[in-house]
Image: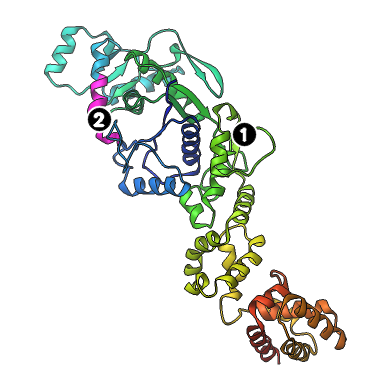
Amino acid sequence: MIIPRVRFAPSPTGYLHVGGARTALFNWLFARRQGGVFVLRIEDTDVERSSAEMVDGILEGLRWLGLDWDEGPLVGGPYAPYFQSERLDRHRAMAERLVKDGSAYYCYCTPEEITRKRDVAEAAGAAWRYDRTCCALSADEIASREARRMPRAIRFRVPDGTTTIDDLVHGPIAFDGANIEDFVVLRSDGHPTYHLSVVSDDVEMGITHVVRGDDHISNTPKQILLYRAVGATLPQFAHVPLILGPDKKRLSKRHGATSVMEYARLGYLPEAMVNFLALLGWSPGGDKELFTRDELVAAFTLDGISGGDAVFNPEKLDWFNAQHIARLAPDDLAARLKPSFEAAGVWNDEFLAGRHAWFAAVLELLRPRAKRLGDFVEVGKFFFTDGVQYDPTAVDKHLRAEGMAEHLAALDAAFSALPSFDVTSIEAALRASAEARGVKAASLIHAVRVALTGRTVSPGLFEVASLLGRERTHERLAATRRLIS
C-alpha cells in the first residue's frame, strides 16, 4: 500500500484565508485518516509580494487551527528545503531537461513582439495563441542566438490530442490540446512559472494526491503534460468546490473577515472553525453536524467532497461556535477567556484561585448566551466591575416610575433580612415585597435588573443577584436609589 503524501502549498502574499484554510484542512484530514504525510510547502517565488511576515501569519493560522505538518518549515524533512524560492536550481534543471528531451524549446520572442501579434489578431477578431515562431528555429539559429546570449524563455511544446483528468471529485474532465498554447515554464529572467515549479516540487517530494480548489482545474492539464514529459507518476487530483459568500459570489472581504486569525481575534474557537470549514463542501453522510477533530479524522474521505460550491454562512459559524463553547470543560473555558478578560481590563488571577468556584458559576450562567468568547465580557461585565454602566433608556423606562426608589429600599431591607441569599430566597423575597407594596412583580424585576446590571436584558435575575452576593446587591440598589432620587 502506498502511503499518501499530500501538500498544502500557500503563497505568502497574504495571510491564511478561509479558502486556503479549508484546503489545508481537507489535506490534513486525508493524511491523518489514511496514515499519510502532510507536507507544508511555501510557494514564495513571487518575490515582490511575498514576505516573511505573511509566512509567519500562515504558520500562525495553521497552528491555531491545530493543523500540524509532518514536513515543512520549522520541522524539516527528507525533501528540504520547503521554501520554493530555495529550490530554483531544481526547477531550472527540469526546464533544461525538457529542452534536451525535445519536450520544450527556447523562445527568443520579446514581450513586445508577442503583444504586437496578439493585438493584430484581436483587431481582426481572432483569438491568438503563441504561433511557435521559435519552435521552427534551426539548430544553427539557436546556437547563434545562444552565443549572443539573447534573452530567452523556455516554452513547453504542447502535444496534439486530449488530456484527461480523472478527478476524484468531478470525475473525468477532458482538455483538447488544440486549446492549450505552448506555455512558458521558465521566464527570460530565469524564474520558473507556477506550472513548472509546482510539478518539479511535487515530483521530488513524492506527492501522491493533489487536493486543491476548483480554480486550479484549468492548470491541471498543463501540469499533467509536464509530469508525463519527465516520466513521473501522476498524482491523483481532487478539486474541491470554491467557497462563496451568502450572495453566491466568491468569498471576499466584502462578506466580512477572510483571514483565519481575524476569526481567532473575534472570539471563535479553533474547534468550531475546523468543524465549520470541514462541512463546507464535504459531508460524512447523515444528519450529524457537530464533530470533534478526532471524529472528523475518522469520518473523512475524499468521496464525501461535493462537486457544488459551498456557501459561507456567518450565522452557521456562530451556531457552531456556541455549540463548541457549550462543550468546553469549565477550566478550559476559563483559560480561553483570560485574554479577552485581560483586554477588557477585568481579569483577576483570583478567578482561577480563591474565587474559582464563583467564577465557574458565573461562566455557566453566561455560557448559554455566548456565541463568541468576547460575549462573556460583553454580557456579564457587571459581574466583574464594582460599578454599573446604566443604559439611559433602561433607566427612563424602568427606574423612573413613581415610587420606585421606595420600592427598591423596601426590597433592599427584605434582602438584608434573608437568612440565606440564594436564588429561591431572593425570588420569594422580591415577589413578597412586590405584593406587599401593591406593585407588579414584573415591574420590580425589570427595575432590579437595571439596578444590578445596567441593562434591560441579562441572564436570570435571581441567579444574577445570588452570584453578585448580598453585599454587592445592596450597594447597587443603594446606588440606584441615589441615581433616581
Q: Horizontally, is 433 left or right of 101 in the view?
A: right
Q: Is residue 10 above or below residue 183?
A: below
Residue 72, percent from left and from top: 34, 38
84 magenta-colored: yes
**Which residue type carries mark 2?**
Leu
Q: Residue at x 50, y 26 (%)?
A: 238
Find the magenta span and give its range. Answer: 83-95
Q: CA distance from mark 2 to mark 1?
A: 39 Å
In the rendered image, the vertical position of residue 101 relative to residue 260, given as above or below: above
Q: Which residue is mark 1?
A: 283
Q: Is residue 366 visible?
A: yes
Q: How is the image coloured?
A: rainbow
> Which amino acid, mark 1?
Ser
95 vs 66, left or right, is left
Q: Which residue is mark 2?
A: 88
Q: Position of residue 247 (x, y in %)?
A: 62, 42
